[in-house]
Amino acid sequence: MFTPQPIGFVRSPFRDASAVPKGLNAQHPEEGVLEILREFVPGLTDIEGYSHLIVLWVFDRSDGFDLVITPPSDDRPHGLFSTRSPRRPNPIALTIVELLRRENGSLHVRGVDMLDGTPILDIKPYLSNIPEEKLRRGWLADAEARKG
Amino acid sequence: MFTPQPIGFVRSPFRDASAVPKGLNAQHPEEGVLEILREFVPGLTDIEGYSHLIVLWVFDRSDGFDLVITPPSDDRPHGLFSTRSPRRPNPIALTIVELLRRENGSLHVRGVDMLDGTPILDIKPYLSNIPEEKLRRGWLADAEARKG
């Protein structure tokens, strides 16, 4: 396999997990900064052309996992891989952010749901959507329908 | 950080990287199977309800990285984090697949671009799109326009 190493860290308004909006219809309008380590900054060349980025990061304040859980968006249990729970065999998270502007190694973004100081593993361009009419959202759509 | 561990392995028609379609307009219609290890199978509960899954996996046959590269989709150099190159500081890949059916720990999917035997790190539900009118695709859109 490989040894994970941070390419940078998130600056975010969230100091602890309880402050991050969760559950159905959670919105993430908050702005934050992806601070990329100096040695990796050349890898950001041309990133300004993208409106949205995929950020892979570490749930570094999460520990262990259960395979069946009841997530904040429902009152019924679901398999871990059907959820976005932070407690996973590999504690890797994924967030799509909107790139607002770049200042050298600082990417100012909207849509952060990471805690302040979170290690970043990778950044990839967001390239395309799944056609809306082909997308099914499983138990989450059911949970939304039940809550009206 | 953490120690990556496979939750399963990909069965794919691709035996080596040269066989995987790359570059502009690359299509990935191939079907494959995500074989999840027995110990993690309870974590798949309810996953059948989703049409599309995010698969995080390891570029396990990739080594090292360059921060500025010329990708197969262009004849000009770009920053690594503006590309989907397999040679990255953390060799983690992301593929969106369509879930065709589940047979216990075997997820039959369409859209594989992994090599046969690739280790899987995580599976997450694909939940939503970025509104099409808000999506900008940077140098890739430019490269497409130049090639007509």
Image (cartoon, coloured by chain):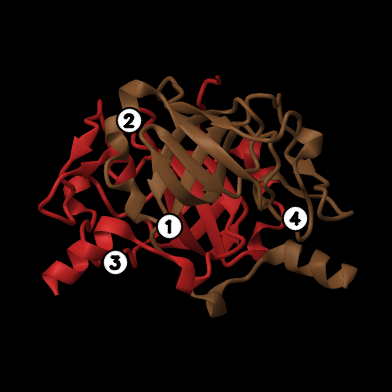
Chain colours: A red, B brown
Instruction: For residue A8, say whether it is visible.
Output: no
Q: Nearer the viewer, residue A40 or A22?
A: A22
Report which residue position mark 1 lands on.
B51
Q: Nearer the viewer, mark 4 or mark 3?
A: 4
Q: Residue furthest bottom?
A: B133
Report which residue position mark 3 lands on.
A27
The three-letter amino acid code for the residue at tag 2 is Val
Report which residue position mark 4 lands on.
B26
| SS for callout 4 | loop
Q: State left or right for residue B42 relative to residue A33.
A: left
Q: Nearer the viewer, residue A21 or B4?
A: B4
Q: Chain of mark 1?
A: B
The three-letter amino acid code for the residue at tag 1 is Ser
Confirm whether circles 1 and 3 share one chain: no
Quarter of the image with the C terminus of chain A is bottom left
Q: Residue at (47%, 68%) from the top-left corner?
A: A134
> N-terminal of the two: label 1 or label 4?
4
Q: How far is mark 4 from mark 2, CA to CA?
A: 32 Å
Q: Nearer the viewer, mark 3 or mark 2?
A: 2
Q: Chain of mark 2?
A: B
